[in-house]
Amino acid sequence: MGTSRKVIRIDLGSSIPVYRQIADQIRAMLVAHEFSPGERLPTVRQVAVDLGVNHNTVAEAYRNLAEEGWLRLERGRGALVISRSTPTPNPRVRNAFAQRLRNLIAQVRAAGVSPQAIRTEFEEAATALLGREGKGSGR
Amino acid sequence: MIWLNVLHMNPVWSLVVLAAASLEYLMPELSRPGVAFSVTVAPEFRCSSRHAKIVRYYRRGVLLSAFAGLVVASGSIERLRGWDGPAAFCTQYVIFLIAFLSARAATMPYRVSPSETREADLSRREPPAVLAMLVIAPLLTMAAVLFWTYTNWQQIPDPYPIHWGLDGQPDLWIERTPMHVYGVLGLLGGIAALLAFFGYGFLFWARRNTGAQHTRYSFPAVWIALFLGAEYFVAASATLPLGLDIRPLELIVLAILTASSLYLIVIGPAGGQAERRPDDNTPDEAWKFGIFYFNPQDAALFVEKRFGLGWTINFGQARAWVLIAMVLAPLGFGFAFVMSIAS
């Protein structure tokens, strides 16, 4: 797991702030267990240099992930991935997720993406991020 | 009357002028495919007749710059006597700059927006600390030589040679005075510190390649090796007070440096590894006059040049100015010292 390439991509022209793009992609990797507890992420400086953005942008992304309990920040040494216990499910979070998902599907459908393509993307994203986790356990 | 006096030409500076002009002449071909005169263009623009015409005019300017530089180097201008060499270099560079800026202005209408997508590989680790030691080792060696010089002052020959001619015989000697001995060491130390600063910066403060094909782009590694080689060359020269014959070692290093320089041109930005070259991820607006990179929003201290071989400094970073001042101060004292010896 530790040897495969873990590339994040940002789009400076996107309306989504760069720090959120970085945090979202690292979180996706963490959820998919691409990083194990004890592994170290590169330093803020190194990621900022590679992406060609300001230090503060990457620092903000790391801080957000640290506040969510994914990382422990170590000055000058990057960030350590820590084991994070899954929080108790919150109905509000689940409702918000369902709403955002519906909005997103409506948005891409309105943009012309076929229902089949939406289903495929949805399946692939779920498989990539969740694997076989929770399969068949129902609601 | 101003004319080209070949017999009185300063050979070293004439070679410098010719080498600079040759590289500048070739530069349009050596630039990355999506860039022309530091402007982001569509790759097909580089094959257009318009681009060919701009390059033609640019090259005429470069040829003129070489000719003007050689005229000055030949000592044809009475007022510049004694300063022929530096004046020749400056003349060549100024005319080249005018040719380059004109070509850049002519290219501007064909500018396209550079990609705004950036990548970073989180699984790549920083270069090992042993590489940092490789950069610092020559400076430590020079500090040791300085200590030896201080503690063994009487063992230093008086006078001692600091330069040899092509026939292998010493042709420049200096007296064993603190100003001369420590002045030479200070000058060499300044140059080595400058090279170490660049070597360390390319390793730790520059963008790393991300894409699978880009990791096989060996240009940065050879470039860093070139700077390290030059640093070791300078450090070896600093051992002169010890009375060691370092000329064979220096010749070997010089041969390696020449070979790797040629290799860089062959594999370089538009050479054999062009397709492996990653985007430079720099906005056009940050390239002032197409040569100076000024981008406070970019954390990289060094970025690959748009026009020219190698890397340049990001002048938008405050620490760049601090570091430059730290390195240039001893160099300035060193050159003042050389001028005092020469006079």
Image (cartoon, grey):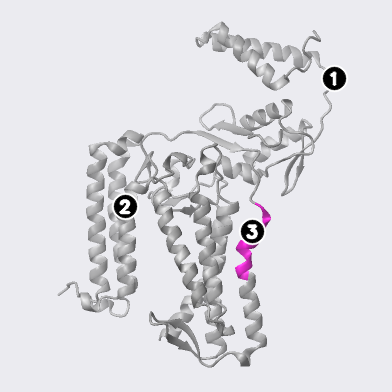
Q: Which residue is mark 1?
A: A88
Q: Secondary structure at mark 2?
A: helix
Which residue lies at the image location 63% right of the left edge and 13% below the top edge?
Answer: A122
**The residue marked by circle 1 belongs to what chain?**
A
Q: Which residue is mark 2?
A: B26
Say which amino acid is labelled 3.
Ala
Q: Is residue B47 left or right of residue A28?
A: left
Q: Secondary structure at mark 1?
A: loop
- Considering only vertical position in the picture, is B242 above or below B52? below
* Mark 1 surroundings: few (<14), some (14-19) or many (≥20) residues within 10 A: few
Q: Is residue B317 left or right of residue B171?
A: right
- Asked whether residue B112 is drawn in magenta, I would say no
- Considering only vertical position in the picture, is B312 above or below A118? below
- Asked whether residue B138 is drawn in magenta, I would say yes
Q: Which residue is mark 3?
A: B132
What is the span of residues highlighted in magenta in the rendered image? Answer: B128-139
- Residue B131 quadrant: bottom right
Q: Secondary structure at mark 3?
A: helix
